[in-house]
Amino acid sequence: MKLSVIIPSYNEEGNVEKIYNSLSKTLENISYELIYVDDGSKDKTLIELEELYKKDKKHVKVISFSRNFKKEAAIYAGLSHSKGEYTCIIDGDMQQNPKYLLEMLNFLEKNDNYEQVAMVMKKRRVDNFLMKVSKKAFYFIIDKISDVHFESGASDFRMFRRCVLEAILSLPEKNRFSKGIFSWVGFNTKYMEYEVEPRLNGKSSFNFINSLNYAIDGILGFSTKPLRISTYLGMFSSFVAFIYAIIIIIEKIAFSIEVSGYASIICVILFLGGLQLISIGILGEYIAKTYVETKKRPIYIVRKTLGINDK
Ligand code: UDP
Ligand code: MG
């Protein structure tokens, strides 16, 4: 098998068949499998997938989750069942045109020294101003504070060889931030540009709050620098307080100046209270993540599979 295509799908009833038609036309000269992962959809996605499986048992495989485990889990499930020499991940909503699969495949076939191709979006027409600015800020921050490189605009839309696949599957963590995992495993990655299309049917499940939570999970998963920053903030504010205490003592003893300033005291108390809460929050976030990991729960639970020969 040359290529495994993983398609995480959550409430994509209107897109399942369209992406199938487009993918099977694009890949007609290649041996391939399409692994659809139904991430606990609430609409008719699974029914559509069953129809598709009946129609084309040779290429279509389906994994259906017992509930919504989120996109990262869907990707992991697909990767675990990939049989191809190359594996590729593509969204199920046609925002990523299947024609780029051939470009990625050609590149990997011609360039032995690269193990991975990642598509980078040129510009995202569908995003509003707030999303655009916050995504830029996110990539800037995470690239600066984590040990691995985060390419701005690179998504899960990528293709890689089996060595990369095996490396990714060897990471057992529950908090799976694939953008980070793809970089963390290393290997030579080629970045190629692509144009994002508008969503075909249905609506995006990422709003501003979802994306913010996703970004925080990403930063926590790939860096412990926030803890270091809160340590430095604590050291800095103690230092400022110490200097100010000396100034006050000198003023009082040498110049008999009355210490005044109710307003400034309130400001300082609020400021330090805020810093303390932020630091406790950061600490708590890491403890919570550790707690979740120690439970060793599975990343996803399967309700039904089609065309997958699991033992
Ligand atoms: N998706 C998923 N599980 C989820 C949310 C999304 O498998 O809980 C899939 C979704 O079906 C789509 C891809 O992830 O194929 C990208 O999702 P979406 O289009 O909502 O995100 P956006 O393109 O707006 O970032
Ligand atoms: Mg989308």
Image: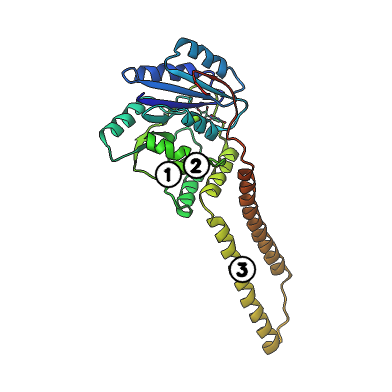
Q: Mark 1 is on which residue type?
A: Val
Mark seen at residue 237? 3
Image depth: mark 1 or mark 3 in front: 1
Q: Residue furthest front?
A: 311
Q: Mark 3 is on which residue type?
A: Ser
Give neighbour class at mark 1: few <14, some 14-19, many 20+ (Cα, 10 Å). some
| Residue drawn at 64 percent across, 42 percent down | 295
| Residue drawn at 34 percent across, 38 percent down | 115
Q: Nearer the viewer, residue 99 or 180?
A: 180
Task: Describe residue 109's horizontal placement relative to residue 224 as left or right.
Answer: left
- Element type at mark 1: loop
Q: Residue furthest bottom?
A: 254
Give neighbour class at mark 3: few <14, some 14-19, many 20+ (Cα, 10 Å). some
- Element type at mark 3: helix
Does residue 155 show up? no
Q: Disc 1 marks which residue?
A: 185
Looking at the picture, how far across and down is residue 204, in whole percent? 54, 29
Give neighbour class at mark 2: few <14, some 14-19, many 20+ (Cα, 10 Å). few
Image depth: mark 2 or mark 3 in front: 2
Task: Describe residue 79's horizontal placement relative to residue 256 as left or right.
Answer: left
In three-dimensional space, the C-alpha distance between marks 1 and 3, rounded to whole angstroms, equals 38 Å
Q: Disc 2 marks which residue?
A: 171
Does residue 164 show up? yes
Q: Disc 1 vs disc 3: Cβ atoms closer than 8 Å?
A: no
N-terminal label among 2 and 3: 2
